[in-house]
Image (cartoon, rainbow, N blue to C red):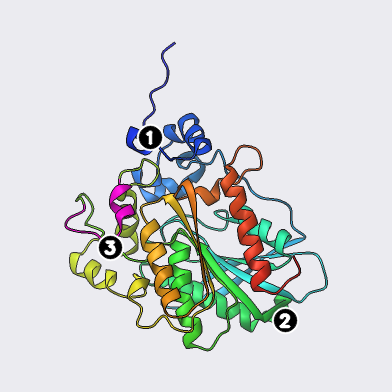
Amino acid sequence: MVAEVKRLPIPEKYLPGLDPEFRKLWDEHGAYTTRADERPVEEYRENPASLSFTYPVWAGPQVFNVRDWKVPVSNPDGEVTVRVYTPQGPGPFPVHINTHGGGWTVGGLGSEAAWCREMCNRAGIVVVDVDYRLSPEVRFPVALYDSWTAIKWVISHAAELNVKPESLSFGGLSAGGQMSAVMAHFARDEGIDVKLQLLTVGAFDFRQVPATGKDIEGPVPYESFVTYKDVPWGPLGRLQWFLDHWIGTDPEVREKTFNDWRCSPVLAPSFQNLAPAFIVTAEFDPGRDEAEYYGTLLREAGNDVVIKRYPGMPHAFAHYNHPERGLSLSREYIKDTAAALVRAHGLAP
């Protein structure tokens, strides 16, 4: 019998140092998948499970209560759904607001449901997941302001949600991490106290990203961006595909947007007096170095910053948290982030 040919094999140069659990998982399952950027976005959204590496992903544990709310948003006018996970008890509870990943183009309330449920149970807090509007139907910076509007809505509806607005944190993964970093600046500027900004494998500088179909040109200040530009699970072409939807393809618009600090947070006018940060990076992620550089900028400005790099891990490792067939380091990430939220909100461990 002839073995099925892997269509997305791991190049030999990446094997040293790559986590053995992830190598096995990828070889047996991920190498046969189709990435989102290899199909039209409409086709992906029709059946994301058929075009995603879902084998190590799960729906998460049961929680005491789950309820969806509608939040009005503007520019353009509309509404977004927020899903509220509430633990058992009288409350009011501290609250954490999650902004999901997916390159501003795909994903939704199912993307980080397992993590949200775990945080609700482990930390004993309310977790609010934001289903912001996606590109290309809306482009930068609509998703950012949808998410910010949701945060302010949570604060203004604290009594209905049974949460403590004075004990607020937020964060996100990948695109959600980028937006959460920007929203920490918004919160500081509006005098909103934030206990923690949790930034997981976020992107913080897009100035080095070439147009779709082109390779990296000239020197790039982030070694990981060059070293891991062709990893099969998240190559440069995947990032370019997301940016084509989020920003568009017009060269002048792209250059202007990439130099807007709300797109590339490393360009923010000030890094002082921001919320404490827990920055998560993955060793085999092209965006690793820019995320760690962003953490350095926060730390040099006097902010409380913890940076943890998960060795041997790819960009999306935090999703692979299935209790039996996931990754040990993804489950460690669950424990780490729950502990960080417990500390940030001053809860008993």
Q: Amino acid at mark 2?
A: Ala
**As drawn, which residue projects farthest toward the right?**
90
Front residue (pair 187, 288): 288
Residue 54, image x, y percentages? 53, 41
Residue 86, image x, y percentages? 73, 66
Which residue lies under the disc numbered 2? Answer: 159
Kindly identify which numbered label has been placed on residue 248.
Answer: 3
In this image, 342 relative to 225: left or right? Answer: right
Quick check: 19 above or below 142?
above
Residue 151, image x, y percentages? 56, 76
Placement of the C terminus among the 4 image quadrants: bottom right
Quick check: 121 above or below 213?
below
- The reply to whether the C-beta atoms of the residues labelled 1 and 3 are less than 8 Å apart is no
Label whose residue precedes the other's in the sequence (1 or 3)? 1
Magenta residues, as a range? 216-229
Kindly identify which numbered label has been placed on residue 10.
Answer: 1
Tell me the SS state at disc 1: loop
